[in-house]
Image (cartoon, helix red, strand yellow):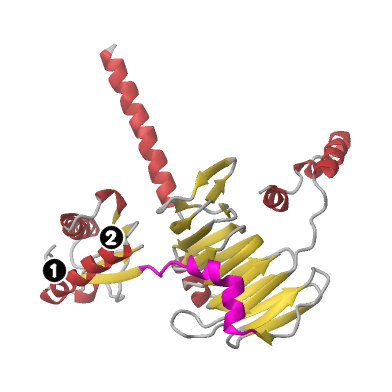
Amino acid sequence: MLSGERSYERCRGSLVGGVLGLMLLASCATSVPPPVPKQSMFLVIPDPEGKVGQITVTNQTGTQVLNQPRQASTVQSANDAPSPPATLQETEIKQIFGEALAAQPSAPARFVLYFKDDSDELTPESEILLPEVFRTVHDRGALDISVIGHTDTIGTRDYNYQLSLRRARKVADLLVAQGVDRKILEIESHGEDNLLVKTGDQVREPRNRRVEITVW
Amino acid sequence: MRDLLVIAGAMVLVLVLSVAVASASSSIGLVKVTEGTATVQRGDETLPARLGLALEEGDILRTGANGRMGVVLRDDTRLSLGPESEIRIDRFLFAPAKGHLALVVKMARGIMAFVSGNIAKLSHDAVRVETPVAIVGVRGTQFLVKVE
């Protein structure tokens, strides 16, 4: 626990000038030993969708690019260059990183529901999506749900702010009716300020009349 | 006297509400998985890493010998720690419309699994993981780090 505080906060005394600064620096030097170099290992694996990305490992003595499945590079100290890529076995990876991988959360789920013109009533197509939204909220044990209402650009900005607020509240009420705790809901209204499809003012655009839901 | 109490009460309420709003707007993500000893240090305060705890820039995430923790950030980045691990979310900026994109994670020890999110997708040099001996530039998506 202490090691972390040392590595982040360093010693404030070194910032203070003059004799006081030197005194602080001295007391600091006795209580905090210099940080020990820490060997690190870096490893690329396919993401949950199976795609392999790319990372670059760099320090003052070298750089390695890792972009093949299970490619690893090890760095002994800040003065040693990253090792050339070596491929690890799946069993080794599980052995070393299994506990971190086991704690990996799922990505937030997103839904977009569309509304009828100048209304807080869902389109029939979006109405059909509701059970899937409810199922997702339930299955994930949602901890936080963001509900953001939007409109197209017909009408005034103020009117649209109110309209998209009504839309967001409508969706929030539907969720609460399914047993969702209101405390985990974050309701926002963006009115006509956050168009999905860019249009000029006073343009009817069904794809902009929407509520975006993010389930965390 | 009663009026005074009502006014004082209202003032406290306003204060509490404004604090609540401030913390919600500065939240950069939340704790989604927690097991055993897992804490979040914010300034001088150490909070137990309960499910749903909102995270802030600068938070230090720590796990004990039997601990694990998984968090999701606002841009869909997912970080998870095994036991005896410690990271600091040094910088998190996610305002794509303004082109403000940055994520810097400092790792002091332990093991971490990292799945990059929208910041890495939108900007190739915006995501960085720093350990005491090297810096990782992240194009995406999933990688693992161990610091001894």
Question: In the rendered image of this protein, does residue B95 appear above or below residue A80?
Answer: above
Q: Amino acid at mark 1?
A: Leu
Q: Give the camera-side residue of B78 and A153.
A: B78
Q: Amino acid at mark 2?
A: Val
Rendering quarter of residue A136 = bottom left
Q: Position of residue B44 (x, y in %)?
A: 59, 40
Q: Which residues are magenta?
A: A88-108
Residue depicted at 56% across the width and 81% down the height: A45
Q: Chain of mark 2?
A: A
Q: Chain of mark 1?
A: A
Q: Is residue A59 left or right of residue A137?
A: right
What SS does tag 1 mark?
Answer: loop
Residue depicted at 57% across the width and 58% down the height: B89
Rendering quarter of residue B92 = bottom right
**Residue A133, which numbered label?**
none
Q: Which residue is mark 2?
A: A147
Question: In the rendered image of this protein, does residue A38 appear above or below residue B41?
Answer: below
Q: Residues within 10 Å of mark 1 (few under 14, many from 20)?
A: many
Secondary structure mostly seen in the magenta stretch: helix
Q: Position of residue A129 (x, y in %)?
A: 18, 73
Q: Residues within 10 Å of mark 2 (few under 14, many from 20)?
A: many
Q: CA distance from mark 2 to mark 1?
A: 14 Å
